[in-house]
Amino acid sequence: MPVLDDLFSGDDVRAAAAVEQVTAEHLPALEARLAGPDPDARWWAVAGLARLGGERATELLLAAAADADAGLRAAAIFGLGRQAVPSAIPLLIQILDDPSEYLGRLATDALIATGKPAVVALIDTLEHSVQPRIRANAARALALIADTSAIPALFRALEDDSSLVAHWADQGLERMGVGQVYFKP
């Protein structure tokens, strides 16, 4: 298959063009390459899976998001954001606690892309995480999703010890039209 030949050619320009042509018929080959030893082929397999969508592709992306290879994890998290599937929310919330701030940020962006289905989990994370970085990512996600059910949690977050959490809480409230109003005495 010419698409797969280009995708796994080792030439990033050819692979980038080929990934846009991946279809469901390529799923078995992508799965096989993902299970293989070649890091470059595994990465491009994840890129193809992200383009495909569907239950099996999502399952493979979820597994890749827990891989030992940080580059592959990053590609899988990005792919989960591209698919924006609610089934990825628990794993993405867990990744917010990853030691890598980059992976945490990718997970935040994927949760933002998922939107309203992620709000309850993000509110819980905002209110219960002891890590300021995780609370800030949750507040940022809630601010950018701008679902009104997060308003009470964002108001409480204005008092957070972390100025970054308070900033994103304020931004979220502002986006939803309920920012702070100051009156001259």
Image: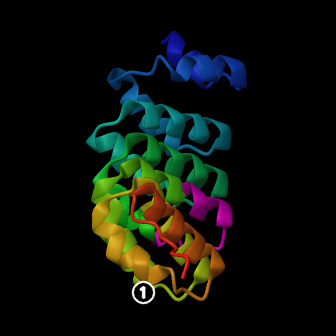
Instruction: Please say if 108 is above or below 29.
Output: below
Between residue 102 and residue 117, name the one nearer to us: 117
Identity, as a three-letter code, of the amino acid under mark 1 = His
Q: Is residue 45 left or right of residue 114?
A: right
Mark 1: give few (<14), some (14-19) or many (20+) Cα within 10 Å: few
Q: Is residue 68 visible?
A: no
Image location (x, y in percent) of residue 185: 54, 82
Instruction: Please say if 47 is above or below 18.
Output: below
- SS majority, magenta: helix
Between residue 155 and residue 181, name the one nearer to us: 181
The residue that appears at 66% across and 38% down in the rendered structure is: 40
SS under mark 1: helix
Q: Which residues are magenta?
A: 94-106
Q: Is residue 182 visible?
A: yes
Q: Is residue 82 left or right of residue 185?
A: left
Image location (x, y in percent) of residue 105: 59, 60
